Structures are given as C-alpha cells and as structure tokens.
C-alpha cells in the first residue's frame, strides 16, 4: 500500500549511505523496522495489517543453552525478513483428532529446539500511536502448539486498533525439565521452568520493542488458553514478571486449587523425575544429556512436563501467593467453556460414578449427588461431564477470580462460553468444547471450516469486542454491548456467552464450591 511504502529518497539514502532510520522515527515502514537488536521487515495484508513473523526474542536454546534461561540475542545488521513464521518448538507431528482439525494445530512445518520466535500484527502508522498490546500464550498441554496456529492469526484483532503478539516457547522435556545439577548450576537452587522463562523474555522484548510497532509497553494484556492460561497464572504470581503486563485474560486454565493435575508439581519431585530420565539415557551428567540429539530426547523422555513450584520463577503455590497478597496486581477476565469436559476420562455407569464420588468425597458425596445426580446412567453421564469440567477448569478459574477480587482495586470479570459450535453430525456432540471460544475471541470464524450461522458472526463480534474493550480499559463493557457485571465472590455473577449473551449467576455454583472444598 502507498501509505506504507518507503519514499524513494529514503530508499536511495539507505542504499547509498547505509544510514538506518532512527528507532524513534514517526512513520512505520514495513520494509525496515529497527528493533533493539536489528532491523526486520514485514508484509502488509490486503486489509492493511502489517504482520512481522518469526522475530527472534532470544538466542536459540541449543547446546549448552539447552535447559538454561533464555539469553538475549546478539545484534544483527542484515535485514531479517519477517515473511514466515519461525520454527515450532519440539513436539509430535500434528495429527487431527476429533474437533481438533488442522486449524487448531501447528502448521505441518519445522520443529526445532531453535524455537524462540514471536509474531506481531499492527495497523499503526506511526510509533507515537501507543496502542494497547495483546500478548497471546498458546495452549497445548505444555507439549504442543505454537504462535503460528491458524486460529491465533492476529489480523482481525489488530484491525480493531490493538497490537497483537503471539509467542513460541519451549515445550515438554526442553521447557520443563528439572535436575539437581541444573538447580545447582542456576545459582538459585531451582530448575525446570524454562518455558515460563521464555514467556517472560518475550514480555521483556515487548517492553523494549513494541513502540516501533505503534504499541504502548505500559498497556500490555497477557492472555492465554488452557496451558497458556495456566502459564498466565504462573506469571501473575512470579516476581520475575512484575511490571511486564497490566491485566490478564485467562481462558480455561489455572493453578489456584491443589489437585492431582495442577499446581502441586514441586521441585523435589521434578528433580527426582529428572534423575530418572538421566538414568534412562545412561547419562551421568547434564553435560551428557545436553549432547543427546533433540529428536532422541523428545522421543524417549518421559513426563509429565509442566510448570514447577521451583522457589524462583514460581516461588510458592499460586493460591499461597494470593493469600499473602504477593501476586502481581492485575485486572482479570477469566472463564471456562460449557463443554470443557470432553477430553478427559471414560464415562462410568451410575453405580460406578456414585462409588467414585464416595471414594473421593467421603461423607460429602451425598451432598455432591444433589449437584451431580446419578439416578440413571444417562443422568450420571451428564453429571460426570459437568464434574470433569468443574474439577479441571471451573474450580481453578473461579478460585482465581475469587482470589483476585479480594483486591478491591482489581477489576475482575468472569464468563462461561456456552455456544455449541455448528458442526458436521460426527462432531456435534462436542458442543462448546475446550478451545472452541478462541475463534470467537480472535474474531476468526473465517479461519475455521464450520457451517457458521449468522448468530456466530454476531457472537464473534460481541466476544472479540469485549476482549478488545478489556485490553483497552480493563473492562469488557462498552457502547452497544450487553452489560457485564464486575465479579466478586458475594455476587457470583458471570457473563454467559452464547446465542443471547447475558449476565447471570454462575450455574451450579454450590456444586463448584463443594468441588473446591469450600
């Protein structure tokens, strides 16, 4: 586009003299954007959105930098073309499964330890516009995913006046491997949270560089879904991330209630697993482990690999940090999906379900059956799905909302996404499934091949506008939007996001409280 084109005089000046435009210049030239480490270029879409892909925010974490904090990039002089995404973190080949069609998966492209790249979308024309910034941390169970997943495309949100950043970070054994020798090597007596350190490094890059894309580093919203949302939770309680973001959006994931899955992964246990992994490879030192080819290590290392309460990046369980009033102050928009349940656990008969409740909840099982009834097998199936959803997501995100709302200065908003996505017959039973809300929040229905209806277009506009409003002001409300009440534990109000978005009490709240042990 003409408005983005470098002037002939400027082009000649650069060609003949080698002079580089100042990082604080007013106009943003897609052919030459000077970051703090060197120049990058991007591509302007037909809709006028500048996208710069594959910007390195740290040195490749290879060789001796495997299982080390991310290191700042060395400066470069040659222009780096930002016309393609960087490599995805090490992970399995993407395979469609159920509702997770290719739009939810990494492009079938390169995977590598050299994966610390981010991507930027903006429609800003000058560096003085100071637009709010949205930094997205992808999900995928800490074992898969990337900032280049098609449904995370930032163009539609950027057209609404913000700057969008998506981030790659180390996964699996490369991102969350602890070992006593690594803890000693760190100088802090901690190891294992390299993926979280990557995310913090990306946020520091945003702080140092987002101005040259028309962004405002003082108005950063950190957001994520599933493992990305759990990452956001970890960074909110991390002293290393203090001051790097102002508010957060957390979709279906947190580590706020002790459970068998989340929030209780301590350093001692993680180090023990690390020692066992070393024995598995016949390695007697971390140096030997670092020499194992990435493909071999990925294929044979046994997990689980996820964030660790290491005493440094994550000093203590998230709920304890909130109880002590030591969490980083943020506004919070959080929630979960109506059918977040479907990935977990086989369905039991009514009899077996009642027995499992009695085993898990003892005398409280009778009260649990009031909210998760099991008189018949069909009823028990519905209750199991609801309980799985509530145990894995509902209680975690609700506990986070409760904890955050105790800070009277914090703006807290809760949602339940309930729109059952239109689908072919074989996928209809998945309903408002885990990750289904993302295309609405990104206003990216065009990126997912579904038989969309007019109501979906309307809902995508509503949800994405609520997200934009929150990114701008810490409040999802705005002109023409359904009123969304501020949440606190006393009112228990949330926004139900479906065909007719409206505020209402959280469904099944008393059952959720039982699940949370309250």
Image (cartoon, rainbow, N blue to C red):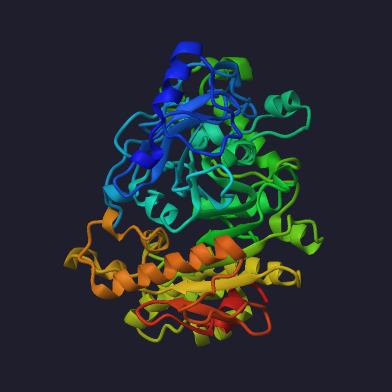
Task: Pick the residue in front: 119 or 437.
Answer: 119
Task: Pick the residue in front: 411 or 287.
Answer: 411
Measuring 46% from the left and 12% from the top, which residue is drawn there?
16
Report x, y in % for residue 295: 41, 24
Quadrant into which the C terminus falls: bottom right
Quadrant into which the N terminus falls: top left
Report x, y in % for residue 325: 80, 61
Q: Is residue 202 left or right of residue 7?
A: right
| Most distant residue in the top direction | 16
State the count of labels.
0
| Most distant residue in the right direction | 324
Quadrant of residue 344 within the rendered picture: bottom left
Q: Is residue 112 left or right of residue 237?
A: left
Report x, y in % for residue 31: 41, 29
Report x, y in % for residue 165: 50, 45
Query: Does residue 93 lie above or below 360 as drawn?
Result: above
Measuring 51% from the left and 25% from the top, which residue is drawn there?
39
Task: Pick the residue in front: 98 or 350.
Answer: 98
Residue 455 visible within the image: yes
Residue 348 visible within the image: no
Task: Pick the residue in front: 242 or 285.
Answer: 242
Query: Does residue 194 lie above or below 248 as drawn?
Result: above
| Most distant residue in the front direction | 9
Quadrant of residue 146 within the rendered picture: top left
Measuring 38% from the left and 82% from the top, which residue is drawn there?
500
Query: Does residue 119 lie above or below 19 as drawn?
Result: below
């Amino acid at each position: 586009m003409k408005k983005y084109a470098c002037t002939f005089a400027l082009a000649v000046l650069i060609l003949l003299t080698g002079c580089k435009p100042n990082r604080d210049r007013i106009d943003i030239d897609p052919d030459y954007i000077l970051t703090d480490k060197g120049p990058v270029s991007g591509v302007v879409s037909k809709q006028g959105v500048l996208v710069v892909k594959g910007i390195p925010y740290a040195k490749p974490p290879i060789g001796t930098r495997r299982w080390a904090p991310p290191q700042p990039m060395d400066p470069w002089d040659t222009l780096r073309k930002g016309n393609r995404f960087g490599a995805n973190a090490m992970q399995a080949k993407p395979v469609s499964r159920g509702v997770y069609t290719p739009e939810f998966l990494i492009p079938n492209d390169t995977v590598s330890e050299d994966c610390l790249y981010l991507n930027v979308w903006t429609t800003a024309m000058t560096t003085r516009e100071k637009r709010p910034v949205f930094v997205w941390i992808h999900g995928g169970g800490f074992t898969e995913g990337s900032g280049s997943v098609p449904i995370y495309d930032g163009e539609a949100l950027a057209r609404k006046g913000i700057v969008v950043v998506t981030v790659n970070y180390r996964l699996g054994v490369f991102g969350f491997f602890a070992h006593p020798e690594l803890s000693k090597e760190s100088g802090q007596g901690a190891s294992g949270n390299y993926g979280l350190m990557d995310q913090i490094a990306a946020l520091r890059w945003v702080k140092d560089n987002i101005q040259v894309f028309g962004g405002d580093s003082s108005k950063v919203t950190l957001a994520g879904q599933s493992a990305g949302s759990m990452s956001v939770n970890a960074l909110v309680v991390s002293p290393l991330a203090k001051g790097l973001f102002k508010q957060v959006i957390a979709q279906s994931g947190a580590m706020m209630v002790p459970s068998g899955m989340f929030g209780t992964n301590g350093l001692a246990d993680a180090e023990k697993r690390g020692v066992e992994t070393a024995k598995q490879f016949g390695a007697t030192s971390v140096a030997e482990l670092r020499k194992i080819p990435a493909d071999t290590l990925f294929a044979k290392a046994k997990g689980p690999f996820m964030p660790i309460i290491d005493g440094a990046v994550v000093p203590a369980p998230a709920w304890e940090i909130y109880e002590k009033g030591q969490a980083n102050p943020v506004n919070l928009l959080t929630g979960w999906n109506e059918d977040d349940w479907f990935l977990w656990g086989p369905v039991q008969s009514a009899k077996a379900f009642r027995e499992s409740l009695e085993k898990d909840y003892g005398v409280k099982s009778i009260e649990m059956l009031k909210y998760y009834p099991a008189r018949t097998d069909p009823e028990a199936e519905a209750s199991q799905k609801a309980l799985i959803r509530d145990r894995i997501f509902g209680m975690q995100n609700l506990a986070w909302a409760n904890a955050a709302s105790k800070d009277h200065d914090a703006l807290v908003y809760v949602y339940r996404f309930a729109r059952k996505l239109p689908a072919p017959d074989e996928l209809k039973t998945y309903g408002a499934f885990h990750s289904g809300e993302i295309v609405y929040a990104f206003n990216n229905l065009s990126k997912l091949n579904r038989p969309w209806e007019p109501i979906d277009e309307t809902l995508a506009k509503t949800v994405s506008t609520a997200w934009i409003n929150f990114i701008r002001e810490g409040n999802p409300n705005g002109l023409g939007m359904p009123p969304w009440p501020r949440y606190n534990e006393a009112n228990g109000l949330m926004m139900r996001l479906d065909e007719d978005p409206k505020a209402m009490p959280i469904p099944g709240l008393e059952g959720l409280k039982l699940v949370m042990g309250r």
